Amino acid sequence: MKLVRYGARGREKPGLLAPDGSLRDLSAHVADIGWNEISDAGQKRLRAIDPATLPKVKGKPRLGVPFTGISKIVGIGLNYRAHALEAGMPIPAEPVMFIKATTCLTGPNDGVIQPIGSSKLDYEVELAIVIGRETRHVDEARALDHVAGYCSFNDVSERAFQIERGGQWDKGKGYDSFGPLGPWLVTRDEVPDPQALRLWLELNGERVQDSSTADMIFGCAHIVSYVSRFMTLLPGDVICTGTPQGVGMGRGRYLQVGDALRLAVDGLGEQNQTILAA
Ligand code: ZN
């Protein structure tokens, strides 16, 4: 299933993308897409509904963050070799972890805000893992059973804040609008191999990132298992799994107000953002 939330910010309604590509309203069945709905049992209940019986949503409404109840966003850094090289950083021996503030979350096509004082605003197309159940110390072999599904994600970053202002990366990762998520939560039954997904990003129409999750240093199962040894993962928690090469930091060209971004992980839906002044 492809679960969505649509409508004005803060007043989103639950829906799903039907196999015919139409957006369908789920309001008669659930109040929202949250912990219950993304759990294995909740997915089973939703899967039993024939999408053809759901009302079609008219027009092209705004799409919001595709589910609620996100207690944390864990970022994995330098998880593609060529990206670590372009960043001038060593290939990590263990996954690099950081936290993105949940207040950075936005819908997939909401604008990205350039913060006051920003000079090195950057993009990162990524595969996001969405946790489906409470998880701690899970073995790698069973880790993907704890995943509700996957989303496209843009790990928007401010490199000067991240790298030149001292301390940890979190300063450059958490500003409002730095976490466009969606358009859909694609449930894991539709993503049999999360290590075989092409992911790409276009800046003003030029393709600048184009890679595959096959190139990750640490795969999704390893990452979920690894993170769960350091903190309890709750349903709805998001792990963004790192970006491939081609970011502005590597190309020496940072984002400017008015720039247009288009990005996707294949099968998980496309995002479109414009860079906005603070
Ligand atoms: Zn990232």
Image (cartoon, rainbow, N blue to C red):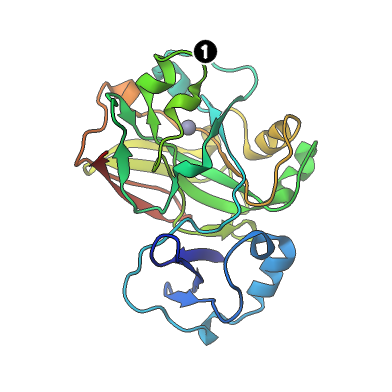
* Vertical comparison of 257 with 274: above or below: above
Residue at 43%, 59% in the rendered image: 64
Residue at 53%, 65% in the rendered image: 3
Q: Is residue 204 left or right of residue 151?
A: left
Q: Residue furthest left?
A: 258
The percent coordinates of residue 221 (x first, y second) are 68, 39
* Residue 172 image-quadrant placement: top left
Crowding at mark 1 (Cα within 10 Å: few <14, some 14-19, many 20+): few
Q: Nearer the viewer, residue 38 or 277?
A: 277
Q: Is residue 71 left or right of residue 212?
A: right
Residue at 73%, 52% in the rendered image: 133
* Vertical comparison of 87 with 22: above or below: above
The percent coordinates of residue 30 (x first, y second) are 61, 74
Quarter of the figure that contains the C terminus: top left
The percent coordinates of residue 81 (x first, y second) are 50, 23
The percent coordinates of residue 88 (x first, y second) are 42, 13
Q: Is residue 160 left or right of residue 10?
A: left
Q: Nearer the viewer, residue 138 or 235?
A: 235
The amino acid pointed to by label 1 is: Pro
Residue at 30%, 24% in the rendered image: 120
The residue identified by callout 1 is 90
